Image (cartoon, helix red, strand yellow):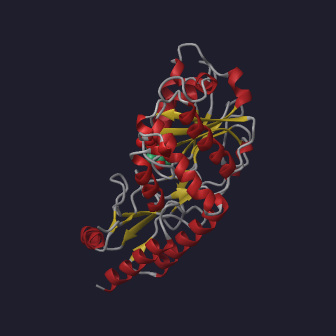
Amino acid sequence: MTRAFNFSAGPAAIPTEVLERAQKELLNWNNYGCSVMELGHRTPDFQGILDNTEASLRKLLKIPANYKVLFMHGSASHQFSMVPMNFLAPNETANYLEMDHWSKMCIKEAKRFNDIHVEQGVRTNSDGLLELVPEDEWKLDEKGKYLHFTSNETIVGIQFQDDPNRFAGKLVSDMCSDILSRPIDIEKYALIYAGAQKNIGPSGMTVVIVREDLFDSFQTERVPALFQYPYVSDKGSMPNTPPSFGIYFAGLVFEWLLERGGVEEMHRQNLEKANLLYDFVDQSDFYHSPVAKGSRSFMNVAIQMKDRTKEERFLAEAREQHLIALKGHKTFGGLRASIYNAMTLDGVKKLIHFMERFERG
Ligand SMILES: *Cc1c(COP(=O)(O)O)cnc(C)c1O
């Protein structure tokens, strides 16, 4: 059996070494006589797993002690509602950068709760390419309690290359598709969230990093307990049965990252993989990138073919070469290669060779 090179945007590729380890431990975890899925979450053993997972994440992202790490049920989309529910009293406001699909979904949810200020974060430049609006051009409401932005727009492949400076200390970010892909300056953030299924592990769990001193200002009126960050934090991410397999699995991925030099080394490798692919696309007359240099994602590389009628054949032939899930999102079309931490340089080289051969016909 061949494991393909999986370019899926999410749920995405998981390092083979991690899957092998989980497989090895599946029936009998740590000689306990059962699998992690069958282990009571109130046992000292499971508490050990949770503590190790958190410690590894703290080490990887250099999370200061005054920030809490929460492993929560559900998806990133739940956080679209939880952020305004916790941060904003009925008469308060916040800034939202509108970029593409995910930030639009997030803005739609926030508007259910509050009157928020929306600012454009993306525009089309004179060459018809998408680019980030430079932060000194953002018109923000200074009364806003936070500035929410999507650090990497997964569908169109547009990414902040660094943490913004505006609203430093009051940034809230959806980092679903680029958490752990580069070092981040945590202290610029009030809260960061990321669903697990792109760069962390299986779907169904979301990681939240939140500054603890904000807890006193959070809303509790009419907010369900399980949706209150302070409550979940107070209960050590276990107000009820946690997503225990997801927490265990994330711990394995974090260990894998630490063994390989952490996020600094991942960042270097991610840039190497992305540059190789973008350089190839740029020199070709057959493919092109819809995103301007300087705004391009090194996690999700959107690629368009000049002749769009060849897309279906491209995808079918790629699949025969064990290069899977290269179809762009239905709302944007074209091709997309998601090259998260688990995608190897080898996989990217194989994709480029295939693209070269396909171009020659
Ligand atoms: C995938 C993704 C989401 C949605 O994640 P769910 O867990 O399915 O809700 C939100 N934001 C970004 C940037 C994403 O890439």
Q: Is 247 on the left-hand or right-hand side of 212? A: left
Q: Is residue 219 visible?
A: yes
Image quadrant for the N terminus? bottom left
Residue lying at 24% horizontally and 72% vertically, measured from the top left: 313
Q: Residue 339: percent from the left, percent from the top?
A: 48, 63
Give the number of callouts: 0
Residue 124: x and y in percent read 51, 58
Residue 262 at what x, y percent from top left? Answer: 64, 59
**Quarter of the image holding residue 182?**
bottom right
Which residue is pictured at 44% across the width and 61% down the height? 16
Relative vertical location of residue 235 with respect to residue 305 in this rendering, above or below: above
Left or right: residue 306 compared with residue 184: left
Q: Farthest residue toward the bottom? A: 360
Residue nearer the viewer, 335 or 12: 12
Residue 173 is situated, as x and y percent measured from the top left of the image, at: 60, 42
Tell me if residue 15 comes above or below residue 357 in the rendering: above
Q: Which of 15 and 305 is in front in this view?
A: 15
At x 62% / y 19%, what residue is drawn? Answer: 219
- Residue at 41 percent across and 77 percent down: it is 350
Q: Quadrant of the C terminus?
A: bottom left
| Relative side of 12 to 237, left or right | left
Tell me if 244 is positioned left or right of 361 in this view. right
Quadrant assignment, res 326: bottom left
Residue 279 vs 336, above or below: the answer is below
